[in-house]
Image: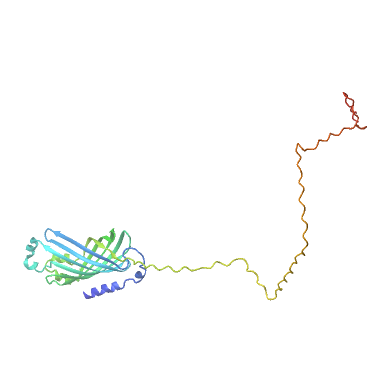
Amino acid sequence: MRRTVVLTALVALAMPVQAARADDDDRPFRRGTILPSFSLGGSFSRNYGGSLLVGAGASYFVAGGFAVGLHLRNVTTFYSQYFKEQVGPDIFAKIPTNEFSLTPSLLWVIYRGERAAPYLSFGVGPVFLNKQRGVLGQWTVGPGVMIRAGGSLWLDLGLGLGMRFTKDRCQDAYNYLDPITDYACSFTWGFRAGLVFGLGGRRQAQPSQPSPPAQYNPPPASSYPAPAQPGPNASPPPAPAAPVQAPPETPPQPATPPPTPVETPTPENSPPAAPPPATTPTETSPVPPPGENLPVPPPA
């Protein structure tokens, strides 16, 4: 039994380290997520009685999609009076009525979807029987799928396969009745359903970094050429111009007498109008006698 527990621990430590380094996304079941689980079940048989199963466990994701866990399960069997009478009090005193199992497990979430996440689980551990029937080994494996029910709540649906070992130890524990021995020590399978909660695993918010101080960028240099500086052999500056002398002062000119006012002619003081000049007839301009026209010569 110690070898089984040590083997499980070695397998957990041999998980890929690169998966932990590459776990930098926000998908479900990332590193640091804790997946607690609870189970409750039972069975009933008309001839044998019934059983009650109570279980709890938790898985911790050491890398994105890879988790190690530990699960506890207790099964209590209630046998009917008919069964007790059939086997007798001596044999019934040897039948274990309580089984407590402690199972380290590995969980691999194949696809870390937001709505559905298929997985594969494997576990192996001891099973303790009451009435001094010893300790058995048991392995379980099974595929399943987790469907998001809301927030961090998931619905777990899967198929469980398992078997107890070693066969000789199992037969010694159940040697009181052949049918029960075949059932308890053979390969078993069954469906399972339950609710699981995904806790933690959130990426921590990075503290905001203070913004760097604004840097002053000088304006770009002008594309115009810089003014030429005088060289060492440049010509001397021109001599200053001679001052302009003011003209000599002249004696003041006598003041001009004011103009004589001109009297504007009016109808009262206007001069008499001159008679129109008389027209004197000339030889070149004959004057026709009154009542006659001047003859016009024919055109040449």
Closest to the observer: 202 or 101? 202
The correct choice, above or below, for 146 with respect to 271 in the image is below
- The answer to whether residue 154 is left or right of residue 129 is right
The quadrant in which the C terminus is found is top right
Asked if residue 57 shows in the view, the reply is yes
Q: Residue at x 12, y 63 (%)?
A: 78
Determine the residue located farthest toward the right in the rendered image.
283
Colouring rule applied to residues: rainbow
Residue 73 x %, y %? 19, 66
Splitting the image into 4 quarters, where does residue 248 fall?
bottom right
Determine the residue located farthest toward the top in the rendered image.
291
- The answer to whether residue 33 is left or right of residue 163 is right
Q: Residue at x 28, y 74 (%)?
A: 10
Residue 112 x %, y %? 33, 62
Closest to the observer: 20 or 90? 20
The correct choice, above or below, for 299 with respect to 198 in the image is above
Residue 269 x %, y %? 77, 38
Q: Residue at x 34, y 70 (%)?
A: 20
Residue 61 x %, y %? 30, 68
Asked if residue 179 shows in the view, the reply is no
- The answer to whether residue 212 is left or right of residue 201 is right
Splitting the image into 4 quarters, where does residue 63 fall?
bottom left
Figure label count:
0
Closest to the observer: 232 or 224? 232
The quadrant in which the N terminus is found is bottom left
Splitting the image into 4 quarters, where does residue 289 fall?
top right
Closest to the observer: 129 or 223? 223
